[in-house]
Amino acid sequence: MRMPLIAGNWKMNGSLALVDTFGRAFADASLPEKVEVALMVPFPYLGAATQALKDGGVAVGAQTLNDHLSGAFTGEVSGAMLTDLSVRYVLVGHSERRSLFGEDDAAVVARVKAALVSGLAPLLCLGETLEEHDAERTEAVVLGQLGAVLDALEPAERGCLVIAYEPVWAIGTGRTASPAQAQAVHAAIRDCLRRYDNALAEGMRLLYGGSMKAGNAAELLAQPDIDGGLVGGASLQVDDFLAICQSAG
Ligand code: PGA
């Protein structure tokens, strides 16, 4: 059985006070036992978040990392620095990194490898733009992004990934993929994984992201190939985020 994962992505939002609020709320909350929760916070809050969220059993993740292990890369953060802070996950290939920071498939592969070398679990994001969606190229785009990474990894490394399907047109727009639409893409991703290895496909967690909120999470999470959510906007409101975590149980 795949353990559902609900991962919050604060993006460039939040504060130390919000870290504290989440720490208290999760320490007091009784969440379903079989749900894993993670929170991807901005770099400056990682240390505080790992401390504040420890009692609530929430894993902490970063939102990106540099593909080099160390060196003269002013302003950048390495995977080893993240594991030093007890960070467990790192987003790679989020559509905002791809579109705003020019990260192509090669850059995504390099970051996935750097994450694995450092002992982090990469949460690999895939998704098509509205234009690609309207041109019915969703599967081609998503499976192309996925194949670029899988082909570059050793079989044992592939099993360390978590995958998130996030249609770009649904991110921060309030326009969610319907449960059936999302399920169809998730099933296509799992079929693609089966071509590499059956056990890999059965064990891989596939999260849905794109305007997931308390009101639509249960329906999305009920789909057979949706194993959790990557939650942006709704992860900034502790009650909304807790409600989504509850609905994954
Ligand atoms: P959203 O963001 O939930 O605000 O649509 C999701 C994401 O970008 O990970």
Image (cartoon, rainbow, N blue to C red):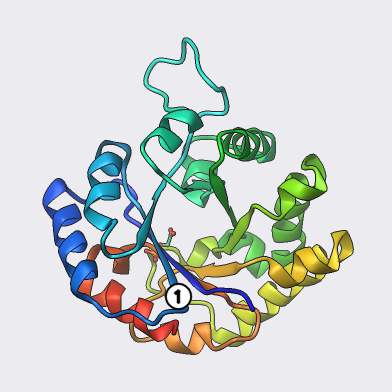
Check disc 1: other Cα within 10 Å, few if <14, some if 14-19, many if 20+: some
Q: Please tell me in which quadrant of the rendered image residue 54 appears.
A: bottom left
Q: Secondary structure at mark 1?
A: loop
Q: Quadrant of ligand 1?
A: bottom left
Pick the front one: 30 or 69: 30
The structure residue drawn at horizontal position 81% and vertical position 49%, both measured from the top left corner, is 155
The structure residue drawn at horizontal position 70% and vertical position 68%, both measured from the top left corner, is 203
Q: Quick check: can you spot residue 51?
A: yes
Pick the front one: 165 or 29: 29
Labels in figure, total? 1
Relative horizontal placement of residue 244, taking residue 158 as reference (left or right): left
Q: Which residue is mark 1?
A: 35
Relative horizontal placement of residue 240, taking residue 5 as reference (left or right): left
Q: Amino acid at mark 1?
A: Val
Split into 4 quadrants, where in the image is the C terminus?
A: bottom left
What is the x, y in percent for residue 227? 57, 75
Seen in the picture, residue 111 relative to 92 is either above or below; the reply is above
